[in-house]
Amino acid sequence: MGNKATYRAGLGLFAVALLATPSVPFADAKPPLRFLTGHVWMWTHLSLVLLAKTVAAVGGLSSALLLITNSAPEPECLGALNGLAQTLSAAGRAVGPVMAGGLFSAAPKNGRSGIWLPFGVFGGVAVLGFVASWGIRGEELEGEEWDENGHDEEEEV
């Protein structure tokens, strides 16, 4: 699939999972299929959302790390590049809970529908990241045996 496509798919799937999360508590009200009871559908819905989030997080993080590694112009600057990436990641982990805490604190003021506020913001950020990921350019960001057309070079030999 390639690093860039996996990164895009991870961000897109993460956006879907985040935007679907607030609907989980309401899933038991009206199941889409008659044979599903409310609680069975709610647990199925929750399982699908968590599966999507986990697959997106693992695929997205793995491909992001590969994109960072492959973006180094020369091996000598790889340590500095990975150090910068880890520093920015740590800053996000420090600032993120403060911002998310504010959103989750504001959510109950809007009743049951207030849960859409934080997950809508998180999903919106993921959508913006997904759109921005289409601006990633450079054939050197893919592995050595991958071309932009989606074929392994070994298959063509």
Image (cartoon, rainbow, N blue to C red):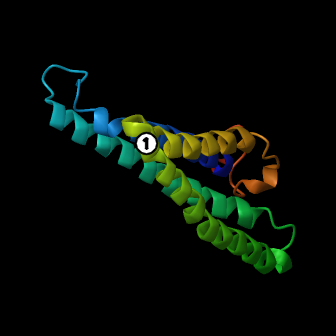
Classify residue 143 as left or right of residue 18: right
Task: Kindly identify the residue that appears in the image at 65 percent across and 65 percent down.
Answer: 92
Classify residue 25 as left or right of residue 5: left
Q: Nearer the viewer, residue 70 or 29?
A: 29
Residue 109 pos. (x, y %) = 45, 43
* Viewer can see residue 116: yes
Q: Nearer the viewer, residue 106 or 31?
A: 106
Examine the image and state in which quarter residue 68 appears.
bottom right
Q: Amino acid at mark 1?
A: Ile
Residue 134 pos. (x, y %) = 74, 39
Q: Which residue is mark 1?
A: 115
Examine the image and state in which quarter residue 131 appears.
top right
Q: Is residue 95 above or below residue 27?
A: below
Q: Nearer the viewer, residue 49 or 146?
A: 49
Task: Kindly identify the residue that appears in the image at 62 percent across and 49 percent down.
Answer: 7
Task: Kindly identify the residue that appears in the image at 45 percent across and 38 percent down.
Answer: 110
Q: Quadrant of the N terminus?
A: top right
